[in-house]
Image (cartoon, rainbow, N blue to C red):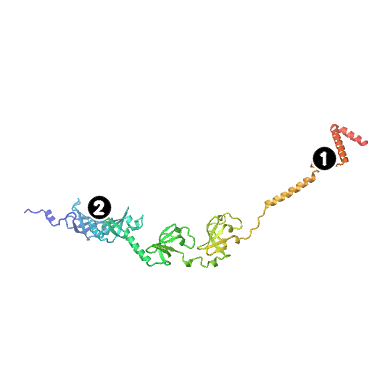
Amino acid sequence: MSEMSFEQMLDETFKTIHNGEVLEGKVISVREDEAVLNIGYKADGILTRDEYSNTPVDLTTVISVGDELTVKVLKVNDGDGQVALSYRRLAAEKANKKIEEAYENKEVLKAPVVQILKGGLSVDVEGGRVFIPASLVSDVFEKNLDKYLNQEIEFVITEFNPRKRRIIGDRKQLVVAEKEAAKKALFEKISVGDTVEGVVKSVVDFGAFVDIGGADGLLHISEMSWGRVGNPRKVFKVGDKVTTFIKEINDDKIALSLKFEDTNPWINATEKFAVGVIVTGKVARMTDFGAFVEIEPGVDALLHVSQIARHHVEKPSDELKIGQEIEAKIVDFNEEEKKISLSMKVLLPEEEPMEEPVAEEIKTDAVEEAVVETENVADEPETVEDDNPSKEEENEAPAEIIENETEKSVEVSLEDESKEDVEPEEAEEEIKSETEE
Protein backbone atom coordinates (compact mmCIF):
# COMPACT_ATOMS: atom_id res chain seq x y z
CA MET A 1 0.00 0.00 0.00
CA SER A 2 1.43 3.31 -1.03
CA GLU A 3 1.86 6.00 1.50
CA MET A 4 -0.65 8.92 1.49
CA SER A 5 0.52 12.41 1.00
CA PHE A 6 0.09 15.02 3.71
CA GLU A 7 -2.76 16.63 1.81
CA GLN A 8 -4.53 13.31 1.45
CA MET A 9 -4.19 12.61 5.12
CA LEU A 10 -5.48 16.11 5.87
CA ASP A 11 -8.47 15.53 3.64
CA GLU A 12 -9.25 12.34 5.48
CA THR A 13 -9.63 14.31 8.72
CA PHE A 14 -12.51 16.41 7.25
CA LYS A 15 -15.97 15.26 6.29
CA THR A 16 -17.27 15.29 2.76
CA ILE A 17 -20.02 17.79 1.87
CA HIS A 18 -22.29 18.20 -1.17
CA ASN A 19 -24.37 20.95 -2.77
CA GLY A 20 -27.78 21.24 -1.13
CA GLU A 21 -26.61 19.58 2.06
CA VAL A 22 -27.87 20.96 5.38
CA LEU A 23 -25.28 21.22 8.12
CA GLU A 24 -24.38 23.02 11.33
CA GLY A 25 -21.79 25.78 11.43
CA LYS A 26 -20.20 27.98 14.07
CA VAL A 27 -19.59 31.70 13.49
CA ILE A 28 -15.89 32.51 13.76
CA SER A 29 -16.03 36.05 12.39
CA VAL A 30 -18.70 38.56 11.29
CA ARG A 31 -18.81 41.78 9.31
CA GLU A 32 -21.69 43.98 8.10
CA ASP A 33 -22.05 42.15 4.78
CA GLU A 34 -20.84 38.58 5.53
CA ALA A 35 -20.08 36.03 8.21
CA VAL A 36 -17.50 33.19 8.23
CA LEU A 37 -18.55 29.80 9.67
CA ASN A 38 -16.54 26.75 10.67
CA ILE A 39 -18.49 23.84 9.14
CA GLY A 40 -15.97 21.05 9.89
CA TYR A 41 -14.67 21.07 6.37
CA LYS A 42 -11.25 21.84 4.96
CA ALA A 43 -12.61 25.20 3.83
CA ASP A 44 -14.68 27.65 5.82
CA GLY A 45 -18.26 28.52 4.85
CA ILE A 46 -19.21 32.05 3.72
CA LEU A 47 -22.68 33.42 4.55
CA THR A 48 -23.42 36.71 2.75
CA ARG A 49 -25.97 39.27 3.81
CA ASP A 50 -28.23 38.48 0.83
CA GLU A 51 -28.25 34.80 1.76
CA TYR A 52 -29.02 35.48 5.38
CA SER A 53 -32.34 37.33 4.89
CA ASN A 54 -34.71 38.61 2.23
CA THR A 55 -34.45 41.99 3.86
CA PRO A 56 -31.13 43.89 3.75
CA VAL A 57 -29.62 43.84 7.23
CA ASP A 58 -26.38 44.59 9.04
CA LEU A 59 -25.15 41.12 10.04
CA THR A 60 -23.26 42.45 13.05
CA THR A 61 -26.66 43.33 14.59
CA VAL A 62 -28.13 39.81 14.21
CA ILE A 63 -25.11 37.45 14.38
CA SER A 64 -22.33 37.17 16.97
CA VAL A 65 -19.09 35.17 17.07
CA GLY A 66 -19.77 31.78 18.59
CA ASP A 67 -23.37 31.53 17.33
CA GLU A 68 -24.34 28.18 15.82
CA LEU A 69 -26.46 28.27 12.67
CA THR A 70 -28.16 25.64 10.55
CA VAL A 71 -27.31 26.43 6.94
CA LYS A 72 -27.59 24.96 3.46
CA VAL A 73 -24.66 24.40 1.10
CA LEU A 74 -25.09 26.27 -2.16
CA LYS A 75 -21.67 25.53 -3.68
CA VAL A 76 -18.83 23.45 -2.28
CA ASN A 77 -16.39 25.68 -4.08
CA ASP A 78 -17.48 29.21 -4.76
CA GLY A 79 -14.46 29.83 -7.02
CA ASP A 80 -12.28 31.13 -4.25
CA GLY A 81 -11.91 27.77 -2.55
CA GLN A 82 -14.64 28.56 -0.01
CA VAL A 83 -18.09 27.06 0.57
CA ALA A 84 -21.12 29.25 -0.23
CA LEU A 85 -23.81 28.93 2.39
CA SER A 86 -27.42 30.10 2.69
CA TYR A 87 -29.47 30.61 5.81
CA ARG A 88 -32.36 32.30 3.98
CA ARG A 89 -33.16 29.47 1.58
CA LEU A 90 -33.23 26.86 4.27
CA ALA A 91 -35.55 29.03 6.31
CA ALA A 92 -37.75 29.55 3.23
CA GLU A 93 -38.04 25.80 2.71
CA LYS A 94 -39.11 25.34 6.31
CA ALA A 95 -41.52 28.28 5.97
CA ASN A 96 -43.00 26.87 2.75
CA LYS A 97 -43.77 23.65 4.53
CA LYS A 98 -45.58 25.59 7.26
CA ILE A 99 -47.43 27.68 4.64
CA GLU A 100 -48.47 24.52 2.79
CA GLU A 101 -49.92 23.03 5.96
CA ALA A 102 -51.79 26.32 6.63
CA TYR A 103 -53.16 26.25 3.07
CA GLU A 104 -54.43 22.69 3.42
CA ASN A 105 -55.94 23.31 6.87
CA LYS A 106 -57.27 26.82 6.05
CA GLU A 107 -55.32 28.10 8.99
CA VAL A 108 -55.02 31.84 9.74
CA LEU A 109 -51.40 33.05 9.63
CA LYS A 110 -49.98 36.16 11.22
CA ALA A 111 -46.80 37.73 9.85
CA PRO A 112 -45.14 41.15 9.32
CA VAL A 113 -45.32 43.12 6.10
CA VAL A 114 -41.71 43.51 4.95
CA GLN A 115 -42.20 45.22 1.59
CA ILE A 116 -44.76 47.38 -0.23
CA LEU A 117 -44.94 46.29 -3.84
CA LYS A 118 -46.66 47.98 -6.78
CA GLY A 119 -49.60 45.60 -6.70
CA GLY A 120 -49.82 44.67 -3.03
CA LEU A 121 -47.95 43.53 0.10
CA SER A 122 -45.05 41.11 0.63
CA VAL A 123 -45.32 39.23 3.92
CA ASP A 124 -42.49 37.25 5.54
CA VAL A 125 -43.62 33.97 7.13
CA GLU A 126 -40.49 32.75 8.96
CA GLY A 127 -38.35 33.28 5.87
CA GLY A 128 -40.98 32.37 3.26
CA ARG A 129 -42.65 35.06 1.18
CA VAL A 130 -46.39 35.43 0.70
CA PHE A 131 -47.87 37.98 -1.71
CA ILE A 132 -51.17 39.68 -0.83
CA PRO A 133 -52.70 41.60 -3.81
CA ALA A 134 -53.99 45.11 -3.10
CA SER A 135 -57.54 43.96 -3.89
CA LEU A 136 -57.32 41.38 -1.08
CA VAL A 137 -55.80 43.64 1.57
CA SER A 138 -59.08 45.11 2.81
CA ASP A 139 -62.82 45.16 2.15
CA VAL A 140 -62.45 48.67 0.71
CA PHE A 141 -60.00 49.84 -1.91
CA GLU A 142 -56.87 51.40 -0.42
CA LYS A 143 -54.72 53.37 -2.82
CA ASN A 144 -51.89 53.90 -0.35
CA LEU A 145 -50.66 50.74 1.39
CA ASP A 146 -47.69 52.32 3.15
CA LYS A 147 -49.42 52.19 6.52
CA TYR A 148 -49.08 48.39 6.52
CA LEU A 149 -45.27 48.40 6.29
CA ASN A 150 -43.69 46.61 9.30
CA GLN A 151 -47.17 45.87 10.67
CA GLU A 152 -48.24 42.33 11.55
CA ILE A 153 -51.40 41.30 9.75
CA GLU A 154 -53.55 38.20 9.66
CA PHE A 155 -54.43 36.38 6.43
CA VAL A 156 -55.20 33.01 4.90
CA ILE A 157 -53.46 31.24 1.99
CA THR A 158 -55.72 31.01 -1.06
CA GLU A 159 -53.12 29.71 -3.56
CA PHE A 160 -49.96 27.65 -3.00
CA ASN A 161 -47.68 26.81 -5.93
CA PRO A 162 -44.01 27.17 -4.93
CA ARG A 163 -42.75 25.83 -8.28
CA LYS A 164 -44.36 28.80 -10.06
CA ARG A 165 -43.51 30.97 -7.08
CA ARG A 166 -47.18 31.74 -6.55
CA ILE A 167 -48.06 31.82 -2.89
CA ILE A 168 -51.09 34.15 -2.50
CA GLY A 169 -52.60 35.41 0.74
CA ASP A 170 -56.03 36.97 1.42
CA ARG A 171 -56.73 39.40 4.25
CA LYS A 172 -60.03 40.74 2.91
CA GLN A 173 -62.17 37.73 3.81
CA LEU A 174 -60.99 37.92 7.42
CA VAL A 175 -61.86 41.64 7.60
CA VAL A 176 -65.32 41.02 6.16
CA ALA A 177 -66.00 38.13 8.52
CA GLU A 178 -64.82 40.13 11.50
CA LYS A 179 -67.05 43.07 10.59
CA GLU A 180 -70.06 40.84 10.08
CA ALA A 181 -69.62 39.31 13.51
CA ALA A 182 -69.20 42.73 15.13
CA LYS A 183 -72.21 44.08 13.24
CA LYS A 184 -74.39 41.19 14.36
CA ALA A 185 -73.34 41.71 17.97
CA LEU A 186 -74.02 45.46 17.69
CA PHE A 187 -77.55 45.10 16.30
CA GLU A 188 -78.41 42.70 19.10
CA LYS A 189 -77.77 45.33 21.76
CA ILE A 190 -78.73 48.73 20.26
CA SER A 191 -82.14 50.39 19.95
CA VAL A 192 -83.61 53.71 18.82
CA GLY A 193 -82.78 56.52 21.24
CA ASP A 194 -79.51 55.00 22.50
CA THR A 195 -76.55 57.34 22.87
CA VAL A 196 -73.48 55.95 21.11
CA GLU A 197 -69.82 56.91 20.71
CA GLY A 198 -68.32 56.84 17.25
CA VAL A 199 -65.48 57.90 14.95
CA VAL A 200 -66.02 59.75 11.67
CA LYS A 201 -64.93 57.49 8.79
CA SER A 202 -65.83 59.69 5.84
CA VAL A 203 -67.49 63.04 5.10
CA VAL A 204 -69.66 63.62 2.02
CA ASP A 205 -71.84 66.47 0.74
CA PHE A 206 -74.99 65.14 2.43
CA GLY A 207 -73.50 64.10 5.78
CA ALA A 208 -70.91 61.95 7.55
CA PHE A 209 -70.53 58.21 8.10
CA VAL A 210 -69.67 57.31 11.68
CA ASP A 211 -68.27 53.97 12.87
CA ILE A 212 -70.14 53.16 16.09
CA GLY A 213 -68.31 49.89 16.74
CA GLY A 214 -69.43 47.18 14.37
CA ALA A 215 -71.46 49.21 11.88
CA ASP A 216 -71.50 52.59 10.21
CA GLY A 217 -74.29 55.05 10.91
CA LEU A 218 -75.23 58.02 8.73
CA LEU A 219 -75.24 61.42 10.38
CA HIS A 220 -77.24 63.39 7.82
CA ILE A 221 -76.49 67.08 7.29
CA SER A 222 -79.96 67.98 8.61
CA GLU A 223 -79.19 66.16 11.88
CA MET A 224 -75.84 67.78 12.56
CA SER A 225 -77.26 70.85 14.25
CA TRP A 226 -80.51 72.55 15.21
CA GLY A 227 -79.38 75.30 12.89
CA ARG A 228 -78.43 75.23 9.24
CA VAL A 229 -75.20 73.49 8.19
CA GLY A 230 -73.99 74.55 4.77
CA ASN A 231 -71.01 72.22 4.32
CA PRO A 232 -70.42 69.10 6.50
CA ARG A 233 -66.68 69.25 5.76
CA LYS A 234 -66.48 72.52 7.69
CA VAL A 235 -67.94 70.79 10.74
CA PHE A 236 -66.33 67.33 10.73
CA LYS A 237 -63.19 65.64 9.48
CA VAL A 238 -62.15 61.99 9.27
CA GLY A 239 -61.03 60.68 12.66
CA ASP A 240 -63.19 63.01 14.77
CA LYS A 241 -64.82 61.40 17.80
CA VAL A 242 -68.52 62.21 18.18
CA THR A 243 -71.31 61.36 20.60
CA THR A 244 -74.62 60.87 18.83
CA PHE A 245 -77.91 59.11 19.41
CA ILE A 246 -79.68 56.56 17.23
CA LYS A 247 -82.62 58.22 15.53
CA GLU A 248 -83.74 55.31 13.34
CA ILE A 249 -82.87 51.67 12.54
CA ASN A 250 -84.02 50.36 9.16
CA ASP A 251 -82.84 46.80 8.48
CA ASP A 252 -79.04 47.12 8.52
CA LYS A 253 -79.06 50.93 8.16
CA ILE A 254 -78.63 53.25 11.12
CA ALA A 255 -79.56 56.94 11.15
CA LEU A 256 -77.77 59.10 13.72
CA SER A 257 -78.49 62.57 15.08
CA LEU A 258 -76.82 65.28 17.14
CA LYS A 259 -80.07 67.13 17.81
CA PHE A 260 -80.50 66.12 21.44
CA GLU A 261 -83.82 67.29 22.83
CA ASP A 262 -82.31 69.02 25.86
CA THR A 263 -80.34 71.29 23.49
CA ASN A 264 -83.41 72.23 21.43
CA PRO A 265 -83.35 76.04 21.09
CA TRP A 266 -87.14 76.06 20.55
CA ILE A 267 -87.79 75.01 24.16
CA ASN A 268 -89.67 77.89 25.86
CA ALA A 269 -89.68 79.64 22.48
CA THR A 270 -93.08 81.22 23.18
CA GLU A 271 -91.52 83.29 25.93
CA LYS A 272 -88.10 83.89 24.43
CA PHE A 273 -89.35 84.89 20.97
CA ALA A 274 -92.66 86.57 21.77
CA VAL A 275 -93.86 89.34 19.48
CA GLY A 276 -92.40 92.66 20.64
CA VAL A 277 -89.19 91.23 22.08
CA ILE A 278 -86.06 93.02 20.88
CA VAL A 279 -83.26 90.63 19.95
CA THR A 280 -79.65 90.84 18.76
CA GLY A 281 -78.36 88.52 16.06
CA LYS A 282 -75.93 88.05 13.19
CA VAL A 283 -76.79 88.04 9.51
CA ALA A 284 -76.33 84.41 8.43
CA ARG A 285 -77.33 84.56 4.76
CA MET A 286 -79.19 86.78 2.33
CA THR A 287 -81.67 86.40 -0.50
CA ASP A 288 -83.36 88.86 -2.83
CA PHE A 289 -86.39 89.13 -0.55
CA GLY A 290 -84.60 89.49 2.77
CA ALA A 291 -81.91 88.35 5.21
CA PHE A 292 -81.87 85.43 7.64
CA VAL A 293 -80.58 86.42 11.04
CA GLU A 294 -79.33 83.91 13.63
CA ILE A 295 -80.81 85.17 16.88
CA GLU A 296 -79.75 82.06 18.82
CA PRO A 297 -77.69 78.99 17.84
CA GLY A 298 -80.08 76.96 15.74
CA VAL A 299 -82.72 79.69 15.35
CA ASP A 300 -82.84 81.82 12.20
CA ALA A 301 -85.38 84.61 11.76
CA LEU A 302 -86.39 86.37 8.55
CA LEU A 303 -85.74 90.08 8.17
CA HIS A 304 -87.76 91.02 5.10
CA VAL A 305 -86.24 93.60 2.78
CA SER A 306 -89.19 95.94 3.49
CA GLN A 307 -88.35 95.85 7.22
CA ILE A 308 -84.69 96.84 7.01
CA ALA A 309 -85.11 100.63 6.85
CA ARG A 310 -87.78 103.29 6.61
CA HIS A 311 -86.56 104.32 3.20
CA HIS A 312 -86.85 102.04 0.18
CA VAL A 313 -84.23 99.27 0.03
CA GLU A 314 -83.74 97.55 -3.32
CA LYS A 315 -81.93 94.46 -1.96
CA PRO A 316 -80.64 93.45 1.51
CA SER A 317 -76.99 93.55 0.46
CA ASP A 318 -77.31 97.32 -0.08
CA GLU A 319 -77.70 97.77 3.70
CA LEU A 320 -76.33 94.58 5.33
CA LYS A 321 -73.45 92.12 5.06
CA ILE A 322 -72.88 88.52 6.20
CA GLY A 323 -71.75 88.33 9.83
CA GLN A 324 -73.03 91.81 10.69
CA GLU A 325 -74.60 92.08 14.13
CA ILE A 326 -77.97 93.82 14.17
CA GLU A 327 -80.76 94.65 16.59
CA ALA A 328 -84.36 94.04 15.61
CA LYS A 329 -87.82 93.50 17.02
CA ILE A 330 -89.84 90.32 16.64
CA VAL A 331 -93.00 91.20 14.72
CA ASP A 332 -94.33 87.71 14.05
CA PHE A 333 -93.86 84.27 15.66
CA ASN A 334 -95.22 80.95 14.36
CA GLU A 335 -94.27 78.20 16.80
CA GLU A 336 -95.87 75.40 14.80
CA GLU A 337 -93.90 76.18 11.62
CA LYS A 338 -90.91 77.49 13.60
CA LYS A 339 -90.92 80.80 11.74
CA ILE A 340 -89.97 84.18 13.16
CA SER A 341 -90.16 87.55 11.42
CA LEU A 342 -88.07 90.58 12.41
CA SER A 343 -88.11 94.29 11.77
CA MET A 344 -85.32 96.83 12.08
CA LYS A 345 -87.52 99.57 10.70
CA VAL A 346 -89.78 99.79 13.72
CA LEU A 347 -86.79 100.60 15.93
CA LEU A 348 -85.67 103.50 13.76
CA PRO A 349 -86.90 107.09 14.37
CA GLU A 350 -89.36 108.66 11.97
CA GLU A 351 -87.54 110.24 9.05
CA GLU A 352 -88.13 114.01 8.56
CA PRO A 353 -89.57 114.98 5.16
CA MET A 354 -86.85 115.97 2.74
CA GLU A 355 -86.53 119.69 1.81
CA GLU A 356 -87.19 120.57 -1.80
CA PRO A 357 -84.88 123.54 -2.60
CA VAL A 358 -85.37 123.10 -6.31
CA ALA A 359 -89.15 123.48 -6.08
CA GLU A 360 -88.79 126.57 -3.84
CA GLU A 361 -86.41 128.19 -6.32
CA ILE A 362 -88.82 127.54 -9.16
CA LYS A 363 -91.62 129.14 -7.16
CA THR A 364 -89.50 132.25 -6.35
CA ASP A 365 -88.42 132.63 -9.96
CA ALA A 366 -92.04 132.43 -11.11
CA VAL A 367 -93.06 135.22 -8.72
CA GLU A 368 -90.19 137.44 -9.84
CA GLU A 369 -91.06 136.86 -13.50
CA ALA A 370 -94.68 137.77 -12.80
CA VAL A 371 -93.63 141.04 -11.10
CA VAL A 372 -91.34 141.99 -13.97
CA GLU A 373 -94.04 141.24 -16.49
CA THR A 374 -96.53 143.41 -14.57
CA GLU A 375 -94.09 146.35 -14.53
CA ASN A 376 -93.47 146.06 -18.24
CA VAL A 377 -97.15 146.09 -18.95
CA ALA A 378 -97.62 149.21 -16.84
CA ASP A 379 -94.91 151.10 -18.77
CA GLU A 380 -96.25 150.29 -22.19
CA PRO A 381 -99.01 152.53 -23.73
CA GLU A 382 -102.36 151.02 -24.11
CA THR A 383 -102.93 149.70 -27.60
CA VAL A 384 -105.95 148.48 -29.36
CA GLU A 385 -105.55 144.70 -29.63
CA ASP A 386 -108.12 144.31 -32.36
CA ASP A 387 -106.73 145.71 -35.67
CA ASN A 388 -109.94 145.01 -37.48
CA PRO A 389 -112.83 146.44 -35.46
CA SER A 390 -116.28 145.48 -36.46
CA LYS A 391 -118.61 147.81 -38.38
CA GLU A 392 -120.82 148.27 -35.34
CA GLU A 393 -117.88 149.60 -33.30
CA GLU A 394 -117.04 152.09 -36.08
CA ASN A 395 -120.62 153.31 -36.20
CA GLU A 396 -120.73 153.70 -32.45
CA ALA A 397 -117.66 156.04 -32.38
CA PRO A 398 -118.70 159.81 -31.96
CA ALA A 399 -118.34 161.96 -35.06
CA GLU A 400 -116.42 164.66 -33.16
CA ILE A 401 -113.70 162.23 -32.17
CA ILE A 402 -113.31 161.12 -35.75
CA GLU A 403 -113.05 164.68 -36.99
CA ASN A 404 -110.52 165.70 -34.34
CA GLU A 405 -108.38 162.66 -35.03
CA THR A 406 -108.46 163.49 -38.75
CA GLU A 407 -107.41 167.09 -38.18
CA LYS A 408 -104.57 166.03 -35.88
CA SER A 409 -103.23 163.58 -38.33
CA VAL A 410 -103.31 166.18 -41.10
CA GLU A 411 -101.50 168.74 -38.95
CA VAL A 412 -98.85 166.28 -37.97
CA SER A 413 -98.21 165.25 -41.52
CA LEU A 414 -97.96 168.87 -42.66
CA GLU A 415 -95.57 169.75 -39.87
CA ASP A 416 -93.40 166.75 -40.68
CA GLU A 417 -93.22 167.64 -44.31
CA SER A 418 -92.39 171.26 -43.58
CA LYS A 419 -89.71 170.24 -41.08
CA GLU A 420 -88.06 167.99 -43.51
CA ASP A 421 -87.85 170.72 -46.25
CA VAL A 422 -86.98 173.83 -44.14
CA GLU A 423 -83.42 174.62 -43.07
CA PRO A 424 -82.75 175.39 -39.39
CA GLU A 425 -82.35 179.16 -39.92
CA GLU A 426 -85.51 179.43 -41.96
CA ALA A 427 -87.39 177.44 -39.41
CA GLU A 428 -86.26 179.76 -36.63
CA GLU A 429 -87.49 182.88 -38.53
CA GLU A 430 -90.74 181.23 -39.32
CA ILE A 431 -91.36 180.39 -35.70
CA LYS A 432 -90.52 183.97 -34.71
CA SER A 433 -92.98 185.46 -37.17
CA GLU A 434 -95.64 183.13 -35.99
CA THR A 435 -95.01 184.30 -32.46
CA GLU A 436 -95.32 187.98 -33.36
CA GLU A 437 -98.57 187.42 -35.12
Numbered label attached to residue 391: 1
* Quarter of the figure with the C terminus: top right
Using the image, determine if residue 433 lies above or below residue 20: above
Q: How many marks?
A: 2
Foreground pick, 418 / 410 = 410
> Could you tell me if residue 332 is visible in this image?
yes
Category of crowding for the residue at label 1, using alpha-carbon neighbours closer than 10 angstroms: few (below 14), some (14–19), many (at least 20):
few
Picture coordinates of residue 358 (x, y %)? 68, 51
Secondary structure at numbered mark 2 = helix
Quick check: can you spot residue 63?
A: no
Identity, as a three-letter code, of the amino acid under mark 2: Lys
x, y percent for residue 246: 42, 65
Residue topped by disc 2: 164
Instruction: Tell me which amino acid carries mark 1.
Output: Lys
At 72% from the left and 49% from the top, the residue drawn is 366
**Which numbered circle lies on residue 214?**
none
Front-most of 34 and 189?
A: 189
Q: Determine the CA span between mark 1 and mark 2.
A: 143 Å
- Quadrant holding the N terminus: bottom left
Query: In the image, is 243 to the left or to the right of 99?
Result: right
Task: Specify the quadrant of the image occupied by residue 309.
Answer: bottom right
Secondary structure at numbered mark 1: helix
| Position above or below: 331 against 76 | below
Query: From the viewer's perspective, is residue 163 above or below residue 403?
Result: below
- Which of 357 and 393 lies nearest the eye of the viewer? 393
Question: Which residue is depicted at the point 46% across and 61% down?
Answer: 222
